[in-house]
Amino acid sequence: MYNTVTKAFRDYYGHAHTIAAYAPGRVEVLGNHTDYNEGYALSAAISYGTYFLVSPAEDSTCRLVAGDLMAEVSCDIQSPRRVTENTWANYVLGVLAGLQARGHTPTGFNAMFLGNIPLGAGLSSSAALEICSGLALSHLYDIAVDRLEMARIGQKAEHEYAGVKCGLLDQVSSLFGEDNALVMIDFRSLETQSLAVGSDAAFLMCNTKAKHALVDGEYNERREHCEAAAAFFNEVLPHPVTALRDVSWAEWESHASAMDPLTARRAAHPIGESERVLAGRALLDSGDLEGFGRLMFESHDSSVNYFENSCAELDTIVAAAKGIPGVLGARLSGGGFGGSVVALIHPRDAETVSHAIQTVFKRAHGHLCDVAVLVPSSGARLIKD
């Protein structure tokens, strides 16, 4: 892919790029909707990602080309405004604006990006584009930005240019990924920890191709209930509660009956998820993959019963996975309402498990789901030719 985009850049602009960066997508393994509740998550950078190539322009024009579409968006370096067509450009334009708040951008640029992250699969192609463009452009303009600041720039681009009020899971995962390891993220301190998964573990991405859009209303409804629940617990518990991360499962059980039933259900999910992440870390440390897989199944059940962010296609795969030999655990990955299931397996079982899942899915929904092995991989980086 790098050779492809390198040649395409030269053919399109008539000269070679000067800077290249790469950022991977991510898979959320455990810890769903915990980021804005200041909880914990376990994720991994994956072996699918996006390259961003750039060279300085001789004038103030910024030219950005999507290498798969060969479509161009341009703007003046002083006015990287949000666009309403070719909206993929907004992720880069938002990052550019974030960098301009931190340093000087004296000239325009010529840029092209190309990735292989399946769109709509819940593997965060948008964050990968934000991060690789941020790395390349910050290097082009000699603007010093550390990894957490880069993650925040990407998040702000999502908020203000793409209109998605996301947390930091995607950007942090893309930046802090390591080979054969999960990234544990504490969303209060933003501290990260690398947890080895070992050679006997692999993950399958099962892309349902379902696109039950995570519309603003659905996301906002859940976030509002979580915030309302945190305010309730701050009133009734003997310790401060600023977010649901501060509430234990035992405390939820003791007080849920006094809450609005829908608010109680919504709150149960991120509370349980953070506790599952902490339990999962201990299981990984002891090499208990079977126990970790059970937590993944529990996580999906919580999405179904409490947060209601699953869908029939996702549930088909998880239900089938519970009866397929070789599957240790499975759950929806990402925001939900479509996208992908992530399944924990032994590498030797990848082919038989993939076939079994596809057979069940086609019988239920009339078409195959895409299944691929995801390898926990190193995070975003500049490319040195």
Image (cartoon, rainbow, N blue to C red):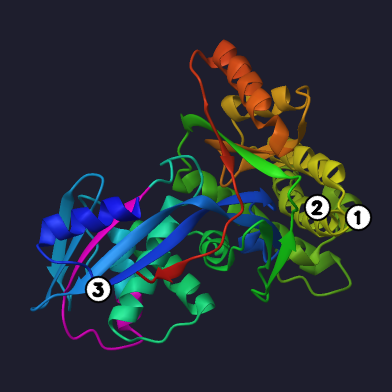
Q: Is residue 108 magenta?
A: yes
Mark whose residue sits in front, 1 or 3: 3
Relative image position of residue 109 (x, y in whole percent): 18, 72
Real-space CA distance between mark 2 and mark 3, rounded to the nearest whole angstrom: 45 Å
- Quarter assignment of residue 251: bottom right
- Across and down, in percent, residue 332 comes to 63, 39
C-alpha distance separating marks 2 and 1: 13 Å
Query: Relative to 46, does residue 326 appear above or below in the rendering?
Result: above
For the residues labelled 1 and 3, the Cα–Cα distance comes to 56 Å
Q: Which residue is mark 1?
A: 250
Task: Looking at the image, tell me whether mark 2 or mark 1 is earlier in sequence order.
Answer: 1
- Image quadrant where residue 275 sits: bottom right
Q: Amino acid at mark 3?
A: Thr
Please identify, in this view, whether the residue under mark 2 or under mark 3 is nearer the observer: 3
Is 180 magenta? The answer is no
Q: Secondary structure at mark 2?
A: helix
Label 1 near label 2: C-beta < 8 Å? no
Labels 2 and 3: the sequence-earlier one: 3
Mark 2: amino acid: Arg
Taking the image as shown, residue 379 lies to the left or right of residue 278, namely: left
Magenta residues (range): 97-115
Residue at x-position 46% and y-position 75%: 150
Q: Amino acid at mark 1?
A: Ala
Q: Left or right: where does residue 207 sit relative to residue 143?
A: right
Q: Check disc 2 and report the residue beneath it.
A: 276
Q: Which mark is residue 313?
A: none
Q: Which residue is mark 3?
A: 18
The crowding category of the residue bearing disc 2, from other C-alpha atoms within 10 Å (few below 14, some 14 to 19, many at least 20), is: many
Give percent across and percent down for residue 238. 89, 72
